[in-house]
Amino acid sequence: MAKRNEATRGRLSRDAIIVSAVSLADSEGLEAVTIRRLAQEHGVTPMAMYWHFTDKESLLDGLADHLIEAVRLPAPSDAPWDEQLRAILHAFLATIRPHPRLAGLAMRRILAAEAGLMIAERVLGLLHRAGFPAARAAEIGTFLICSMVTLANGEPAPGPPPSVEGREQMLRDKRARLDSLPPSRYPNVIAAAPALVVCRDEDDYFALNLDLLVQGVRGLRRG
Amino acid sequence: MAKRNEATRGRLSRDAIIVSAVSLADSEGLEAVTIRRLAQEHGVTPMAMYWHFTDKESLLDGLADHLIEAVRLPAPSDAPWDEQLRAILHAFLATIRPHPRLAGLAMRRILAAEAGLMIAERVLGLLHRAGFPAARAAEIGTFLICSMVTLANGEPAPGPPPSVEGREQMLRDKRARLDSLPPSRYPNVIAAAPALVVCRDEDDYFALNLDLLVQGVRGLRRG
DNA sequence: ACCTGAACACCGTTCAAGT
DNA sequence: ACCTGAACACCGTTCAAGT
C-alpha cells in the first residue's frame, strides 16, 4: 500500500509496526494482523519484519505489552480495599475496551511486562489486605483480570470480520431468530431479546458486571 | 494418515468429522483444526469437507453446537434461585472444562443451538425470579456464561501448542522469572507465585470463582 | 449424493545474499 | 544494522469434473 520514500525510509521500527498492527486489528480483526500484510503497509518485504520480531508470537507479545503499558493505574490511597480494587479493574478495562479484538492478548503478558506485574502486585496486595491468603488471592486476582478481558471482548462471537453493514444485518437476523422462538418454551429469552442482541457498548454492561465481581469478592470474604 | 478402506468407506459424515476435530483440538489446539488436516485424517481430499460443511466457519459452528449439546442441565427444582443458578453454571462449566481449547467457541452458538437457548432460558428465568428486570438479567446472564468460558480457558495464555515437556519447561521459566523479581517492589506477586504459575487444573479455582460470581449476583440484588 | 483434481490467493518461515 | 529474493510447506476456497 504505502510505498517507501525518503520520508519513511529507515523509519521501520518495532513501534511503528505495532502501532499499525493495533489499528489493523481494530478495523479488521486480529486475523487480519499478518506479517505479510503489515510488511505491505510499510512498503517493505515480509522478511524485513523478522529483523524487528523473531517470529509472529513475539509480534503478538509486543501488542500485548503495548496494551498493558497503556494502563493508567490509580495511585494507592487510603480508600477501602474494595473501592481501590474496583478502580484498578476499571482502569484496566478502560484501556482495553477500545480494542476488543486485541483484549484477548493481554493475559499472555500480564506476568511478564513490568506494567503488568505492577497491576498484579496492586491487585494481590488489596486482596491480601482484604484478608485472603496469598494462594487464594492469586486465584481470585487471576480470575478478576481475566474477567476484564471477558468484558472487553464484549461481543461473545469471535467470528468473521463484522463489516459495517454486514454487522447490522447480522444483528437483525439474530433479533429475528430470537423473536421467532416459541414463547411458551422461551419466555425469558424473548423478554430479554433486545438486551441479548445489542452488543453491550453501553457503559451499563461494564459497570454492572464490575460491581458483580467486586461484590462477589466481598461475598467470598464473608464466607 | 488413516487411508480409506471398506470399513470406513462412505462413513465420512458431519459427526465423524466433528468428533475428530474435537480430539484434534484437545491434543494440538484449535489452530491445528484445519480443513486439510481433518481431510487427511479421514483419508479424503480437502474438498470433500465442503460437501459436509459450507465453509470453515460452519465447521466451527458445528464444534460449538457439539459442545453445547453435551451439557447435562439439572432439572428445575424448588431450591432457591441462587443454588439452581450455581448448579446450571456448574453443569455448563463441567462440560466445557475437558476441552479448554474449544471453550471459546461456545459463545457463538449459545443463542442459536436449541440446547443453548434452553440454558439461556433457565439462567434468565432464575435471574428474573431473583428480581432482576429482563434487560438486567440479559446483561448479567451473558456475563455469567462468558465467565464459564473464561474459567474453562484456564491457562490465560492462548499461545502456541504446549507440548508435554515444552509446557513444563515454560512453567519452570515462568516460575523462575517471578522468583527473580525484586521482593521490595513485588512482595505480593512473589508470595503468590506458586499459585500464579500452576495452571489451575484444581477444582479449587473453579469452585472459588463460581462462588464469587453467584455471591456477586446476590450482592447486586442487595444493591 | 458424494468425492476428486487442478488451480488461486493467501499464510509463516528459512536460508542465502545484498548494502 | 537493516533489508531483499527465492523457495518451502502450509492455509481456505472456487470451479469443473467424475461416479
Image (cartoon, coloured by chain):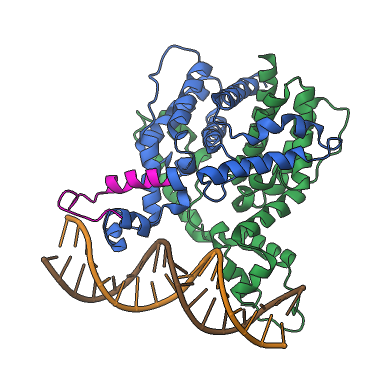
Chain colours: A blue, B green, C brown, D orange
Near-viewer residue (A32 or B207): A32
Quadrant position of the N terminus of chain A in the picture? bottom left
* Residue located 48% across and 28% down the image: A124
Q: Is residue B149 above or below residue D12?
A: above
Asked if the magenta segment contains residue A13, the reply would be yes
Quadrant position of the C terminus of chain A in the picture? top right
Left or right of A167? Residue B185 is left
Outermost top residue: A78
Asked if the magenta segment contains residue A180, the reply would be no
x, y (%) of residue B42? Answer: 66, 74
Q: How many numbered circles does the render carry?
A: 0
* Residue located 70% across and 42% down the image: B93
x, y (%) of residue A39? Answer: 31, 57
The residues colored magenta run A1-25
Residue A89 in view in this figure: yes
Left or right of B36? Residue A54 is left
Q: Name which quarter of the figure residue B38 lies in.
A: bottom right
* Residue located 69% across and 57% down the image: B62
* Residue located 47% across and 53% down the image: A31
Near-viewer residue (D11 or B187): D11
x, y (%) of residue B129? Answer: 80, 23
Q: Name which quarter of the figure residue A208 lies in.
A: top right
Q: Name which quarter of the figure residue A177 lies in.
A: top right
Near-viewer residue (B181 or A50): A50
x, y (%) of residue A128? Answer: 51, 24
Residue B199 in view in this figure: no
